[in-house]
Every structure is written in C-alpha cells, then in structure tokens.
Image (cartoon, coloured by chain):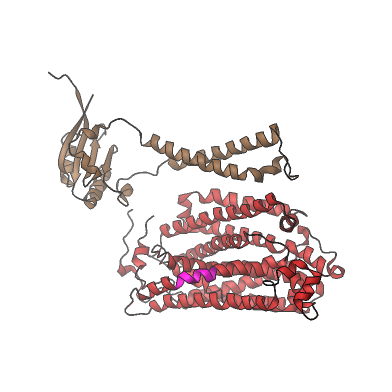
Chain colours: A brown, B red
C-alpha cells in the first residue's frame, strides 16, 4: 500500500493554437489571476502584454553589475599602476591623468560584470537550475516543446477554486484539462 | 497593447501635406537671416580687414562642416533604411529623405572655400604649391618633403576634382532616391517596383556615401594641418554624423507630430527605435573618439600628437574634458531609460542637447587650429591672435547662424514639397503597427 501523499499543483489546459493561447491569456489576465503561466514551443510576439506581465527588474541588476565592474576595474588599475607600483612609460604620468590607459580595462570589466549580472540575475529570477518541476508529472506536458500550447494555473493563486477555475479554462477554449498533482 | 490597430482606412490617400501658411513665417525668416548673413559673410571673407578675413575663414569651415554632417547623415539614414530592407521606418523615412535633400544645397556654402583668397588662410599646403615656380613636384622636393610624398593626394587639380565628385555623385544619389519615393505618392497603382529599385541603388551608393563623409573630412578639416594624420578620422566624423542627423530627424518628427501630422502612422514605438539609434551612436561616438585619442596618446608620434597638444593647452582642455562628460556620460545615462525614448517631447529635448554637444565637438575640431595656423602663415598680421579659448570670435556665431538658417530653410522647404510620409508605400501599414 502506497503511503505517498500528493499535493495539488494546479490545472493544466491545452490550447489548439498560438492565437487561442494568446486570447485565453488575455482572459485569465482580466480575471485577475497572478500565479499562472503559458507554455509554448516558440516565443509568441506580444504574449507578455497579453499575460499582463510587468517589466522585468533584470535591467537594474545589469546596471548595478556594470557599475560594479567599472569601479572594480578602476580600483584595480589605479591601485596597482599608480599606488603600489607606478609604471612610467614614455614619460606618461603615473597619477589620475593616467586614466585613459585604464579605459580598456574599465570597458572590459563593465561588460564582463554586466554579462554575469544578466546571466545569474536571470537564472535567479526564473529559479533555475532546478531538479524537477511539478508539471513534469503530466503525461501531455512534454508536447510543450513540440506542438502543444498550454496554460497552467496554480492552486496557490488566491483566485483558484477547484470548480470555478476548471470552468473558466473550459469556457476560454481549454482542452484536455488536467489536475496536476505533485508528490510531496 | 490596447492601442488601435492601424488599417488602410487610417492612411491619408492623397498624402499628409504640410500646411504651407503655417510655416511660411519661419521659412521667410530663415531665408532672410540666411541671405543677410551670407552678404555679411561675403564681406567678412573677401573685403574686411585681413585679420577678420583670416579668422572668419575658420568660422566658415566650422559652420559649414557642422551642417554638412547633418545633411550627409540624412542621406546615410535613407540609404541604410533602403539597403537593410527595413519596414519599421517607412512612416518616418520621408524625413530621412528630406534631411538628405539639403545636401546638394550645401554646395552653395562650400563655394567660398574654393577661392584661393579664402584657402590661403586655411590650407597651408595649397600656399606652398601655389608658390611654386615651374614644376610643383620639383619645388616640393626642395621645400617640403612631406608634401612631396603626399603630392599624389594633396594637389590642387585632384582637390577640385574630389569636390566635384562629392557634390555631384552624392547629390545625384539623394535626389534620385527621394524622387523614387515621392513619385510613389501619386501612383494610382503603387507596387513594390520602386521599393526594390531603391534597395538596389542604395547598395553601391553606400560606398559613395562612405567616400564622401571620409574624404570631405580629409579635405576640409584634416587639411587644416597637412602634417597631421589619424586613421580614425573618417569614422570619427561618421559617428558624429549618424548620431546628430538622427537627432535632427527626431526633432523634425516631433515637430510634425505636434502640428497634427504623422497621425496614426507613428507612435511611441518609432521614437523608441530612433531613441535607441541615438543611444547606440552616442556610445559609438565615444568608442571611436576615445580610440582615436588613445592610439595617438599611446603611440606618441610627433606628427599625430600635435592635434591633441593644441587642444589640451590654453584652456581648450576644459572644453575637451567637458566633451567627454557632456557628449558621452550624460546622454548615455539619460538614454538608458526606455520610457523616456518612447516620449517624443522628452526625446527631442535630449536630441537638442546632443546637437549642442555636436556643435562643441566641431568647434573643437576646426577652431583651435586658427591661432596656430594663422600665426604660421602671416605672423606680422596674425601674430597676436591667441591660441587659447579666449581667442573665440564673434564670426563663429555669425557663420553658424547664417548656414544654420539656410539649412532650416531648405529643410522646411523640402518637408513642404511632398507628403510628410510615404502614404502609398507597400510597407506603410507594417510600419504604422510597429511594436518593439
């Protein structure tokens, strides 16, 4: 006898095409749901607007990463080349006016740090990498990488109700509606 | 996302024309200032005291090249839009073409620079060659070996030939492309034929454009000091050109929109793209300008460093450092904001600011050479002209206002000639519904 307990993740519904997915997303957005997502084999132009997604805060991470890179490079070059071991080449000054010589380093580290901030900020925001996702329990979900268009509404959304949400998905054209459960 | 989807019912069938009575006042005023300024300039260049003549020649080069970059930039954006098969900018492309169409008129303001009387104060290499008795090459061989080596390029017949090439060919290019575009407006059966022709002719024309921006820069500006050379010069001028002509395009589009034109066909999305181009070229300008400085600073070759030595003494360095922050750091940080780029009015303010910085940039290209060169050419007349920034001269403003007024006149004239957007272009709906 199995004693595994299961927890409801939410409803998964399939949609027949990108355009029905787009229209369904608009309706779920207007119904006021917060914790839900669309799954499609390819990017759909304007879907972020249809889902009511706000602008990502990622650019601020990138900006801060860039500033940190700029400051690091300047400090690194200035301390080593001016303070600790002044390097005099062709009678050029070894003081703050040496700064043009540091520009390539400052440029490179700005790019490098903002690149890191982009990658790791993005991974943090989308919570990757992870070992598993509850939706993988669904038998049909693998088609999201091939020819299936899905919407999943999570049970932890305040608007979620076992019957009401199911009806909503049915009304907006959802097929194969499935209650996905995750193992606890 | 809730905005209205633009359909062919929203496009003006007969085109969106500028109301000529509304702009008549500005146009007349600009023309009057241009004519009056030109008369004063002719006096200052040919009949005033020699000291004024010499100083004003530099003012004229500064103002002429500043507005030349703006008009050449209009040609550049037209060519780029055609050759990259772009759809986004069809509703603003007519503004590119109108700006470019001021280029042939710039020939009028190049004319004074064709007179030996004006050239003698600007281009020392011409004086050396004109002083030759008999064989010029033989003469140069004895007096200036550098000019002897550069003779294949720096000789008078070739110089005048190049002038003809720039204005004839690039003028021909922009007139032809603009005509292709405006003819479409009245065609009862507009197809894709003209679009493809414009795309084809824009390919090789880009080479003509590149030659023109590079070598006008050599002939008018670099020639001020024939000993100096920089491999970044052409691309440096190009960076300022592309950046600031985009600034003019943004201002013109905002102005047209504020008068109720370009309705339905342009939105914040178009300004967002143009703002992004402004941002991209701000960065490109900084990259190229710094690279030029850096290579010269690093290599430490006497013939190269002279340029920066002049501009780093006598308070010019204050202006040079102001350029670093004013032309790059400030607009870079401001233009990072996406919401700002989508707002035509705010973006136009940034564009006006960018143009002011472009004026400073070009002031620093042409004017610091004045004191040094004039002092070399005729020490007895110009000996007391200061090399420092306090040697600034009222003529700089006069020349700038004169050519600027003429530029505005020709630009408004061009805008009024045809519909302000290509209303029968096959891609107009694609452009009107732009989303990025």
> What is the magenta segment's predominant secondary structure?
helix
Looking at the rendering, which quadrant does residue B214 occupy? bottom right
> Where does the image place residue A6, in percent across and percent down from the top left?
19, 25
* Total numbered badges shown on the rendered structure: 0
Quadrant position of the N terminus of chain A in the picture: top left
> Where does the image place residue B235, in percent across and percent down from the top left?
58, 61
Is B415 situated left or right of B328 in this image?
left
Residue A65 is one of the magenta-drawn residues: no
Can residue B20 be seen in the rendering of this structure?
no
> Where does the image place residue B188, in percent across and percent down from the top left?
33, 80
Can residue A130 be seen in the rendering of this structure?
yes
Residues B418 and B148: in front is: B148
Query: From which residue to which does the magenta span run?
Result: B201-209
Would you place residue B78 above or below residue B321 in this image?
Answer: below
What residue occupies the far left of the structure in this picture? A1
Residue B206 is one of the magenta-drawn residues: yes
Would you place residue B426 above or below residue B330 in this image?
Answer: below
> Where does the image place residue B84, in percent across and percent down from the top left?
42, 64
Would you place residue A100 above or below residue A178 in this image?
Answer: below
Residues B365 and B343: in front is: B365
- The residue shown at (82%, 66%) is B376
Residues B303 and A59: in front is: B303
- The residue shown at (68%, 65%) is B222
- The residue shown at (50%, 68%) is B206
- The residue shown at (58%, 70%) is B212
Looking at the rendering, which quadrant does residue B161 occupy? bottom right
Would you place residue B220 above or below residue B352 in this image?
Answer: below
Quadrant position of the C terminus of chain A in the picture: top left
């Amino acid at each position: 006898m199995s004693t595994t307990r299961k927890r409801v993740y939410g409803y998964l519904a399939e949609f027949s095409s990108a355009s029905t997915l787009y229209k369904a997303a608009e309706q779920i957005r207007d119904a006021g749901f917060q914790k839900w997502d669309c799954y499609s084999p390819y990017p759909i132009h304007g879907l972020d607007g249809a889902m009511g997604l706000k602008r990502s805060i990622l650019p601020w991470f990138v900006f801060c990463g860039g500033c940190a890179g700029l400051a690091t490079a300047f400090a690194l070059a200035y301390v080593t080349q001016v303070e600790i071991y002044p390097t005099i080449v062709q009678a050029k000054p070894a003081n703050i006016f040496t700064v043009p010589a540091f520009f390539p380093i400052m440029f490179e580290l700005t790019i490098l740090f903002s690149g890191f901030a982009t990658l790791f900020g993005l991974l943090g925001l989308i919570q990757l990498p992870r070992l598993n996702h509850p939706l993988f329990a669904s038998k049909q979900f693998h088609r999201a990488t091939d020819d299936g268009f899905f919407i999943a509404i999570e049970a932890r959304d305040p608007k979620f109700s076992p019957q009401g949400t199911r009806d909503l998905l049915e009304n907006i054209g959802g097929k194969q509606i499935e209650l996905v459960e995750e193992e606890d | 996302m809730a905005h209205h989807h633009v359909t062919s019912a929203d496009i003006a069938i007969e085109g969106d024309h500028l109301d000529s009575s509304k702009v008549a006042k500005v146009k007349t005023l600009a023309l009057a200032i241009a004519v009056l300024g030109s008369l004063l300039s002719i006096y200052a260049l040919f009949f005033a005291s020699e000291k004024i003549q010499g100083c004003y020649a530099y003012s004229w080069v500064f103002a002429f090249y500043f507005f030349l970059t703006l008009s050449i930039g209009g040609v550049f954006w037209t060519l780029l839009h055609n050759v990259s098969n772009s759809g986004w900018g069809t509703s603003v492309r007519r503004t590119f073409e109108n700006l470019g169409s001021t280029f042939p008129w710039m020939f009028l303001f190049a004319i004074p620079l064709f007179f030996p009387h004006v050239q003698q104060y600007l281009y020392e290499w011409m004086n050396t060659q004109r002083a030759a008795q008999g064989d010029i090459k033989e003469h140069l061989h004895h007096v200036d070996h550098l000019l002897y080596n550069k003779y294949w390029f720096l000789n008078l017949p070739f110089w005048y030939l190049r002038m003809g090439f720039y204005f004839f060919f690039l003028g021909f290019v922009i007139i032809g492309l603009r005509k292709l575009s405006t003819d479409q407006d009245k065609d009862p059966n507009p197809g894709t034929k003209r679009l493809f022709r414009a795309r084809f002719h824009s390919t090789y024309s880009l080479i003509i454009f590149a030659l023109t921006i590079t070598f006008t820069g050599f002939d008018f500006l670099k020639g001020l000091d024939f000993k100096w050379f920089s491999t970044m010069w052409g691309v440096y001028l190009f960076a300022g050109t592309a950046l600031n002509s985009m600034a003019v395009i943004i201002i013109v589009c905002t102005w047209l929109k504020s008068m109720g034109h370009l309705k339905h066909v342009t939105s914040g999305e178009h300004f967002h793209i143009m703002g992004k181009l402004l941002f991209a070229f701000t960065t490109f300008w900084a990259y190229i300008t710094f690279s030029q400085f850096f290579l010269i600073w690093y290599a430490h070759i006497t013939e190269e460093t002279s340029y920066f030595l002049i501009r780093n003494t006598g308070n010019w360095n204050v202006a040079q450092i102001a350029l670093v922050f004013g032309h790059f750091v400030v607009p870079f940080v401001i233009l990072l904001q996406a919401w700002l780029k989508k707002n035509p009015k705010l973006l136009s303010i940034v564009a006006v600011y960018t143009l002011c910085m472009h004026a400073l940039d070009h002031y620093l290209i042409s004017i610091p050479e004045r004191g040094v060169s004039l002092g070399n050419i005729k020490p007895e007349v110009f000996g007391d002209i200061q090399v420092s920034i306090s040697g600034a001269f009222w003529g700089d403003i006069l020349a700038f206002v004169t050519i600027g007024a003429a530029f505005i006149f020709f630009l408004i004239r061009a805008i009024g000639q045809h519909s302000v957007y290509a209303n029968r272009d096959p891609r107009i709906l694609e452009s009107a519904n732009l989303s990025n």
